[in-house]
Each structure stands twice: as structure tokens, then as C-alpha cells.
Image (cartoon, rainbow, N blue to C red):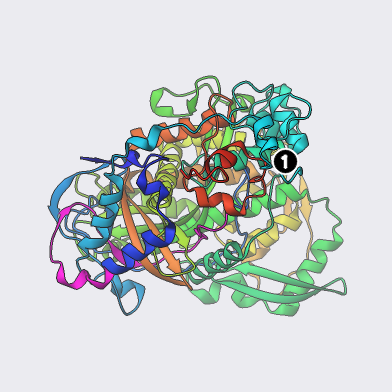
């Protein structure tokens, strides 16, 4: 057994230059055609990814929320034909989370044609796997050697400090006046934990213990750039950094994939005499396209509608509008997943119990409801790609899709869709031998069509595992998930029970046509068929509001929103539908996740990884322990990361290991 965690910071692997690793991989790929078998259950699949994973640049977000596009787009990913979700005879790279065990099995690479076709044509590639295994099996005795202590006095006398930009930060972290060295160890003994400091920078009182500030999945992922740099940023009050060229390039690639899967329509409108560009995501549905509102409304009609909404003069809270847009988009995309097999850029989150030092998990017993938001920290993320794939029977998804389509009586009624999807999932999803299963994927963009360093691959595997973990927790108990979503809104400073203004309701209805019939139910004060919401005592029942707008004759589908509302549309309603949709995912989970590597808008490699829940739990706890002040930050996994770090001239670790000519 070859332990992946043997990639110690001081080992030969970590001292290897990135270019050497890439050259080794490149040389391996030139020889792949002469290899027919592999002894290890690791499979290389030449396909692609999005999302900047460039070695030269760190993360744009220091510790907070990951951004999510309010519009949708996507890159078409191909079907990966497999015999089982364990990929015993399938294609794609299998990289074990904790270890790689020797096992007879094919290594398959994919080249040529479009992505869908590439994922069906496999070519063995043992050398790439051998390269990874060679590195992870290195036992370097020097890995745990510590560099000699370096005092501020010695460093300054040696002339190693020539930049005093962060003198104040050094004094703050050490508690010593005149200190110019940024210490390696300062978190555990500090007066404020990193999370408290982060909350203070966000404008909250860190001593109120409300835990309202969210942190991102990437900020707790192991080996994700440099924890020292991230903590220096947090304690110096830097929340975001300017986007670098690789980040911008990665964002554009992500957007391209997103819009390919979730197309948008763009309208240039005149609203009260002012030009306004509006982007509306198309509703992907089994319903006839001609019946959808956007197919019936022209640019002038939309301009008139938006003008009327603007003249209502409703106060629209920006946070409420943004969260409503994201939740409505997630509802739309999850429905697209169950009907058409994939979706992109969807929200996922978990609640971290600060007292118990673990994620809220209803498998350990249903928590007391409603949840107390102050007891939890939100960990949020954006999943790049979810895909339903055929398992034990090739073409199973297409057959499932036809059966689902024929069973639906109203293709724009969420209640009917949820009911029918639940029935079909029981027939088609079985974890012991699934005919259909779901793969959680993350896209990483690359400047060149080459793999990153092994540590970065392992970090990406951990990130995918966290997304998989969060999704499963959300899928367990829809009632608990509903209250998790309510707590999520409250911790964002948004009232989930406040009526949504019509200036929000109508644009959401145009983007997500599935909402319209639900809004019609709510307008009449009817139940939506989800008990936790229908019986929630905080939902406004004694409500009256008249909507008086002039709509074009061809927009009868929107006319149901006019007139008197007996109950208001709220974020709580969206939380209810999201809870149901998360729950529908539960039967489809498998042990397979994927990292898709992309270059110039094309997936050139897909690495599949096995989900190891115990290892993921350890990674989450390890990451959160830093933010909660229970451990010290780790130094970068490559010394060359320091070359572009603004803290390098005063960083104790860099002065000891790089400027001191002792690379780690």
C-alpha cells in the first residue's frame, strides 16, 4: 500500500520543481501506446476542466464566500460508460483518497473527437500512474527535519529584511514592538482566532459569538496554496485580492461551460428611458418551448414590464435579491439534472457545529428544530458539475429519461416533477448495483494541457469529497435541510419569511418558469405539499397584497401572478423546494467523484477519485481547526510558491527555508 499522505513537506517530491513533474508526465504520455496493462486501480482519462488551477497564482478569495454566477452556462460533458460506480471496468483515473492499492485493472486514456466520444474510447497509460506512484511512495527521512530557529535580531543583522511593509502586522502577531519578522506560529496563542479576526474584518463583533461570517470550502481544503499566506492576509485585513490573468482565464472557461449547459438570453431594454441589459437563463423543460413566457414576450414587452416594476417603487434589499436569484437558479438547475442528466454551478453548504467540532449530521439523531443559527458556522461552496450517468446498463439514463417524461402530467409543475422523480429514483437507483448514479465533478483550468503537482491533485480530490459530503448531508432529511436553509438565510442577514417584492418575483418567474405554478398556489393560500413549510408558524398567513400590472396578451402564463395575494412568496418557499430536491439526490450517490482538467475550453484529462468519508471528515476538521485557533498554519507545499508572495521578505518560514538556501 502506498500512502498518499506520505507527500511530506520536506520530501524529495515536494522539493521537485513543477517543470520536472510536468516533463515526467509529458514523457510518460509519449510512451502510453506501448503499455497494455496496469497493476493499480488508477485510470487516466484524457478529457477536460474549468476553474483556474494554475500553480503560479493563489486563490482570489482569502477565506470567505465563493462566488456564484447568477446566470447559467456550461460545457457539455460526455457520457462516461461504466459497469458500476466503483468503475471496476470503466474509464477515467481512479485515485484513492487515502491510499493506492495494487490491483489488476485497465488504465484508460481518452483522446480525439468531442468530449462525449472521447469518454468512450480508452487507451492504457501506465507511465503517468507510475509517475504519481513513484512520487507518493518516496520515504525521505529529511521530511520531518526542522530548520533552525531564526530570530528577528539575527535576520535583520544578516541583512535579510529589506522590506518593512508588514512591520505593523509582525508586531501585531508577535505582540512585540519593533519586531519585523512575520512568525510561523501565532494562531494558537493569539487573542483572536482566525475566524474571529475574519469576522471583525467583515464588520461583525467577533466577541458576540454569532458565527455569521461564512467561510468557503477552498479555505479549509488541505494543501490549497499556503495557509501562512492566507492567515497573514486575514490578520492584515485583506479579504480579496485582485484577479490574476490565470484566474480571469479560468473564470471565462468556467462561464463557457456553464452557459453551454444552461443557455441564457440577453435583452437590451429601455426601462424608464434608461438602457438596461438583462440576462435571463432559459428554462430547460420537457414542456413545449412555444408555451414558455420568453418565447411569447418580445423586447418591447419585457421593457414595458420592467418599467412597470420599476415604477412600483418597491424597496429591494440587495442581499435578499441576490440570495433569491441564487436559490431560484439552483432549483432550476437541479430540475435540469434530474430530467436531462447534468447541471453546473450550483450551491452547496454545510453547518459546522462549533461546540461539537463537527458538521451537523442528522444521522447522529435529528437536531432540535428550528436550529439556533448562532451555534453554527456556514461552510459554502459552488459545485462545478453534477452528472447522472448510466451504471450497470449502458443507455440506462436515456431509458430512465423517457420513462420520466411519459409519466409527467404537467412539465412545469414542480410538485408533479418531484413526485415522479422520487418514484423513478426508487426503480433506477440502487447503491449495490445502480443503473444510474450521480458523479460530483470539479473543473480545474490549466494554462497548458498538463497535470499539476501531485499535492494539487490530492487537494482537488479532497475538495470534491467535501462537496460530495455536503450534498449527502443535505439529502438525508428534508425537514432538517429546510431548517438548515432557513438558518443559512438568517446568518446572511436576510429574513427568509419576509415577502419578496414583485420586482423580484416577476424576473425570477421569467428565469425559472417552474416557480410560476407554485407562486399561483401561494397566491391563493394553498399548501405546496411539503409539510415543514406548509406548517411553519412563521410563514405569513394573514397577508393581502394586490398586484396590478398590464401584461401583453400573449403572456397568460404570467397572468396568474396578478391580483390579490393571500400568502406572500418568500425565501422560505425556495428553501422548501431546495430541501426536497436535495433529498431526491440521495439514492443516486456513488463512491466516484471526478476532477476535470481543462485547457482553452477543452477537457483534456479527467481524474476519477473514490469517496473516503473518514478521510474527508479528517480534512474538514483539520481545516476548521485552523480557523478556530486550534492549530498553527502550514507552510506552502512548494517553496517556489513564495516567489510571488508579498510577505516573502518578512516571512519567517521563507527566510529560513528559501532565503536561507534551504528549500523544503
Percent position of residue 46, x then y:
32, 68
| Residue 346 among those drawn in magenta | no
Residue 664 placement, left or right of 485: left
Q: Secondary structure at mark 1?
A: loop
Relative to 248, residue 660 above or below: above
Residue 361 in the image, given as x and y percentages of width and height: 44, 29
Task: Pick the residue in front: 653 or 544.
Answer: 653
- Magenta stretch: includes residue 33: yes
Number of numbered labels in the structure image: 1
* Displayed quadrant of residue 101: top left
Name the foreground residue: 218 vs 158: 158
Q: In the drawing, does residue 27 fall left or right of residue 378?
A: left
| Nearest the eye: 375 or 156 | 156
The answer to whether residue 578 is above or below residue 83 is above
Residue beneath the point at 24% across and 46% down: 430
Q: Can the viewer see residue 576 in this picture?
A: yes
Q: Give the x, y percent position of residue 663.
A: 48, 45
Residue 410 appears in view: no
Indicate the position of residue 605 as horizontal and vertical percent values: 35, 65
Vertical order, 188 against 167 (above or below)? above
Q: Nearer the viewer, residue 97 or 280?
A: 97
| Relative height, residue 255 to residue 372 (above, below) | below
Relative placement, left or right, of 330 versus 102 is right
Quadrant location of the N terminus? top left
Q: Name the residue furthest front.
A: 158
Stretch of the chain drawn in magenta:
29-57
Q: Main secondary structure of the magenta part?
A: loop
The residue at 73%/39% (across/down) is 236
Disc 1 marks which residue? 498
Amino acid at each position: 500500500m502506498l500512502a498518499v499522505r506520505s507527500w511530506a513537506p520536506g520530501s524529495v517530491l515536494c522539493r521537485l520543481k513543477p517543470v520536472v513533474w510536468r516533463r515526467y508526465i509529458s514523457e510518460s504520455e509519449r510512451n502510453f501506446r506501448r503499455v497494455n496493462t496496469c497493476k493499480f486501480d488508477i485510470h487516466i482519462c484524457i478529457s477536460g476542466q474549468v476553474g483556474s488551477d494554475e500553480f503560479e497564482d493563489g486563490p482570489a478569495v482569502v477565506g470567505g464566500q465563493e462566488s456564484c454566477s447568477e446566470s447559467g452556462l456550461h460545457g457539455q460533458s460526455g457520457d462516461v460508460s461504466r459497469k458500476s460506480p466503483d468503475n471496476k471496468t470503466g474509464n477515467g483515473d481512479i485515485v484513492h483518497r487515502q491510499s493506492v492499492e495494487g490491483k489488476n485493472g485497465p488504465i484508460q486514456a481518452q483522446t480525439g473527437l468531442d468530449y462525449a466520444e472521447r469518454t468512450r474510447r480508452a487507451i492504457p497509460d501506465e507511465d503517468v500512474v507510475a509517475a504519481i506512484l513513484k512520487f507518493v511512495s518516496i520515504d525521505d527521512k529529511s521530511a520531518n527535519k526542522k530548520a533552525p530557529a531564526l530570530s528577528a535580531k539575527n535576520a535583520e543583522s544578516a541583512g535579510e529584511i529589506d522590506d518593512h511593509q508588514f512591520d505593523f502586522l509582525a508586531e501585531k502577531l508577535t505582540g512585540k514592538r519593533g519586531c519585523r519578522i512575520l512568525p510561523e506560529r501565532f494562531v494558537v496563542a493569539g487573542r483572536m482566532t482566525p475566524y474571529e479576526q475574519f469576522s471583525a474584518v467583515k464588520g461583525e463583533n467577533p466577541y458576540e459569538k454569532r458565527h455569521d461570517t461564512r467561510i468557503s470550502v477552498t479555505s479549509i481544503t488541505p494543501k490549497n496554496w499556503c495557509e501562512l499566506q492566507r492567515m497573514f492576509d486575514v490578520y492584515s485585513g485583506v479579504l480579496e485580492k485582485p484577479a490574476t490573468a490565470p484566474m480571469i482565464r479560468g473564470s471565462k472557461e468556467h462561464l463557457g461551460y456553464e452557459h453551454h449547459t444552461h443557455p441564457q438570453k440577453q435583452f437590451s431594454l429601455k426601462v424608464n428611458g434608461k438602457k438596461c441589459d438583462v440576462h435571463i437563463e432559459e428554462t430547460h423543460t420537457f414542456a413545449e418551448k412555444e408555451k414558455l413566457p420568453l418565447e411569447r414576450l418580445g423586447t418591447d414587452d419585457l421593457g414595458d414590464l420592467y418599467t412597470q416594476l420599476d415604477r412600483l417603487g418597491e424597496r429591494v434589499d440587495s442581499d435578499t435579491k441576490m440570495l433569491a436569484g441564487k436559490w431560484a437558479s439552483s432549483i432550476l438547475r437541479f430540475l435540469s439534472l434530474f430530467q436531462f442528466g447534468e447541471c453546473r454551478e450550483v450551491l452547496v453548504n454545510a453547518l459546522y457545529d462549533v461546540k461539537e467540532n463537527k458538521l451537523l449530521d442528522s444521522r447522529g439523531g435529528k437536531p432540535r428544530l428550528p436550529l439556533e443559527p448562532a451555534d453554527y458556522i456556514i461552510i459554502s461552496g459552488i459545485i462545478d458539475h453534477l452528472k447522472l450517468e448510466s451504471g450497470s446498463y449502458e443507455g440506462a439514463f436515456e431509458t430512465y429519461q423517457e420513462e420520466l417524461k411519459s409519466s409527467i402530467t404537467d412539465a412545469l409543475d414542480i410538485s408533479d416533477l418531484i413526485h415522479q422523480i422520487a418514484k423513478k429514483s426508487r426503480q433506477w437507483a440502487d447503491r449495490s448495483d445502480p443503473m444510474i448514479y450521480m458523479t460530483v465533478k470539479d473543473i480545474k483550468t490549466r494554462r497548458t494541457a498538463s497535470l499539476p503537482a501531485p499535492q494539487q491533485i490530492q487537494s482537488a480530490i479532497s475538495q470534491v469529497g467535501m462537496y460530495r459530503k455536503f450534498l449527502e448531508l443535505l439529502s438525508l432529511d428534508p425537514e432538517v435541510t429546510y431548517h438548515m436553509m432557513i438558518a443559512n438565510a438568517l446568518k446572511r442577514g436576510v429574513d427568509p419569511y419576509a415577502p419578496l417584492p414583485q420586482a423580484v418575483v416577476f424576473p425570477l418567474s421569467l428565469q425559472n418558469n417552474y416557480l410560476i405554478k407554485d407562486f399561483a398556489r401561494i397566491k391563493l393560500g394553498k399548501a405546496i405539499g411539503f409539510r415543514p413549510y406548509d406548517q411553519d408558524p412563521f410563514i405569513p398567513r394573514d397577508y393581502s397584497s394586490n398586484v396590478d400590472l398590464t401584461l401583453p396578451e400573449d403572456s397568460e402564463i404570467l397572468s396568474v401572478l396578478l391580483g390579490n395575494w393571500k400568502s406572500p412568496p418568500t425565501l422560505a418557499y425556495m428553501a422548501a423546494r431546495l430541501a426536497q430536491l436535495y433529498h431526491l439526490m440521495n439514492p443516486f450517490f456513488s463512491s466516484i467523484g471526478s476532477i476535470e482538467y481543462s485547457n482553452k475550453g477543452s477537457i483534456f484529462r479527467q481524474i476519477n477519485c473514490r469517496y473516503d468519508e473518514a478521510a474527508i471528515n479528517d480534512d474538514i476538521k483539520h481545516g476548521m481547526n485552523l480557523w478556530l485557533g486550534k492549530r498553527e498554519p502550514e507552510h506552502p507545499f512548494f517553496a517556489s510558491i513564495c516567489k510571488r508572495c508579498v510577505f516573502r521578505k518578512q516571512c519567517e518560514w521563507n527566510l529560513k527555508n528559501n532565503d536561507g538556501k534551504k528549500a523544503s
